[in-house]
Amino acid sequence: MGDVQRMLRANLHAGPDQVALVTITAPGADVLPWDGDHVEALSAVTWNRTAAERWSKLNRACRERLRRADLKSPLLSYVWQLQRRGVLHAHLVLDFGHDDDKAATYAYVQALRDLATEYGFGFIDFRDRDGKAGRSSVMPRRIAAGYLSRYAAKGGQLAEAAALPARTRPRRLLYVSRRLTALSLCTMRRLRSVRFLYWIRSGNSSVLFARAGRLPDWFGTPEYDAVCALAQAP
């Protein structure tokens, strides 16, 4: 979860100054029956297990609609989290920097709202200004990074989603676009390498013994420089 928090912060800080947070929820009680304070167990497991595949299809359909309008996908990142009622929902981070990016975000949100029920999702939560329905979903990137990284803390909704049995949740709970990782150079693979490098530099020989005395292939390559840069970054 520490790597997840850093992944979110480093990449969102490398992105546009303004982003929009959009929440995609599961359907209500008219589709997912309740059992007390939670969605009925079998219904929750079935919905969670199929959420990633349905989301992939929904996202592809929305991107195709934008492509026909000559707009690029504004999707920068998303995080799956577990609601208290026992079903997953997703927080999307969309580009809201320049006018073209804003137009793409509005079009993408509209496509989500038009197509959500077709792919088994519920309410799409997005507001571009404060109002009676709540606070604006548009915010500076640093605030969005802090907001989402809290979910990866101990007891947070992302951590709870990760605790679900592997077969009953999306395999990838966090996505960050290559557009951002190309700027930040921060990926989960490199963050794992940072931890490996830390133990090597601290003189922990058990790490190398576990690898039969071999250093990883990325030592002495440009990848090594990227890992060292991450190790030195705050």
Image: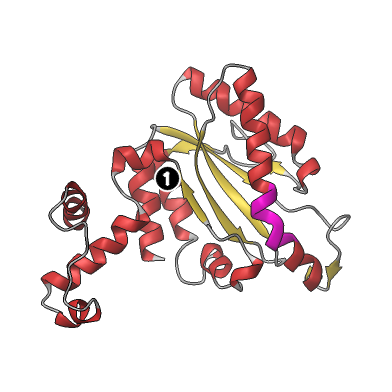
Which span of residues is magenta-colored?
47-54
Which quarter of the figure is the N terminus placed in? bottom left
- Residue 207 to residue 113: above or below: below
Dividing the picture into quarters, in which one does residue 144 lie? top left
Question: Is residue 163 within the magenta segment?
Answer: no
User: Residue 219, percent across and down?
Assistant: 16, 58
Please name the residue shown 66% across and 62% down the image.
Answer: 83
Q: Which colour style is shown?
A: secondary structure
Question: Is residue 48 within the magenta segment?
Answer: yes
- Left or right: residue 174 compared with residue 6: right
Given residues 142 and 215, the one toward you in this image is 215
Please name the residue shown 30% across and 37% down the image.
Answer: 183
Q: Secondary structure at mark 1?
A: helix
Which quarter of the figure is the C terminus placed in? bottom left
Dividing the picture into quarters, in which one does residue 68 lie? top right
How many C-alpha atoms fall within 10 Å of the one at disc 1: few (<14), some, or many (≥20)? some
Residue found at the far right of this picture: 30
Given residues 174 and 13, the one toward you in this image is 174
User: Residue 233, percent across and down?
Assistant: 20, 53
- Residue 151 appears in the rendering: yes
User: Residue 127, percent across and down?
Assistant: 62, 35
Please name the residue shown 38% across and 39% down the image.
Answer: 180
- Left or right: residue 8 compared with residue 233: right
- Residue 39 to residue 5: above or below: below
Amino acid under disc 1 = Ile
**Residue placed under numbered mark 1 in the picture:** 143
Please name the residue shown 75% across and 48% down the image.
Answer: 121
- Left or right: residue 67 compared with residue 25: left
- Residue 126 appears in the rendering: no
The secondary structure that most of the magenta stretch takes on is helix
